[in-house]
Amino acid sequence: QMQLVASGGGLVQAGGSLRLSCAEASGRTFRPYQVGWFRLAPGKEREFVADITWSGGSTSYADSVKGRFTISKDYAKSTVYLEMNSMKSEDTAVYYCAGRVGSLTTWNYWGQGTQVTVSS
C-alpha cells in the first residue's frame, strides 16, 4: 500500500524552474516498483511525464519534457522529485504522482495533484 502526497506546484514564468515532490505519507516501508509523474491540462487527456524505477533508478521521459525535466529519488526520505527547468506555457497542468508495485501492473496509487502554472 502507498499513500502518496504531491507538493511543490505554483506559478512560474516561462523559462523558469520548479521542483515537485512526491512523498510517501503512510509511514509504511516504501518499496514501489516505479513512481511516475503524470499531468492533466484543461481540455486534454492525462499525459505521462516521467517515471523512475525505485530500486534500479532507471528513468524514462515523455518526448515533450526530455532535456528539461529530471526525475530523481531519495531513499531515506521515501520521496521522488521532478525538477522542471526551461518551463513553457504548455507545461501548465495539474501534476500527479503515481506508484505501482510491478512492471506489468497498473498505476494503482495516486497522489492528490499539484497545480503548475507557467505564465508567458
Image (cartoon, rainbow, N blue to C red):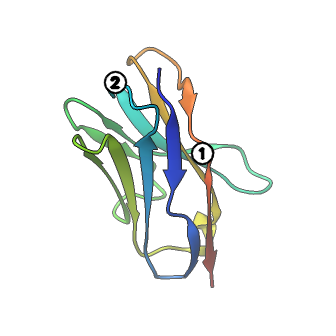
Q: Nearer the viewer, residue 71 or 3?
A: 3
**Could you tell me residue 84's position as x and y percent?**
42, 66
Q: Residue furthest right?
A: 43
Query: What residue is rendered at 62% in x and 44% in y?
Result: 112
Q: Which residue is mark 2?
A: 33
Sequence order check, earlier mark of 1 and 2: 2
**Could you tell me residue 60's position as x and y percent?**
35, 42
**Callout 1: SS:** strand
Q: Residue furthest front?
A: 27
Query: Is label 1 or label 2 in front?
Result: 2
Q: Amino acid at mark 2?
A: Tyr
Q: Say which mark, if any, is on residue 103.
A: none
Q: What quarter of the picture does the C terminus occupy?
A: bottom right
Q: Amino acid at mark 1?
A: Glu
Look at the picture and state if 34 lies above or below 38: above
Q: Which residue is mark 1?
A: 47
Residue 42, quarter of the rendered image: bottom right
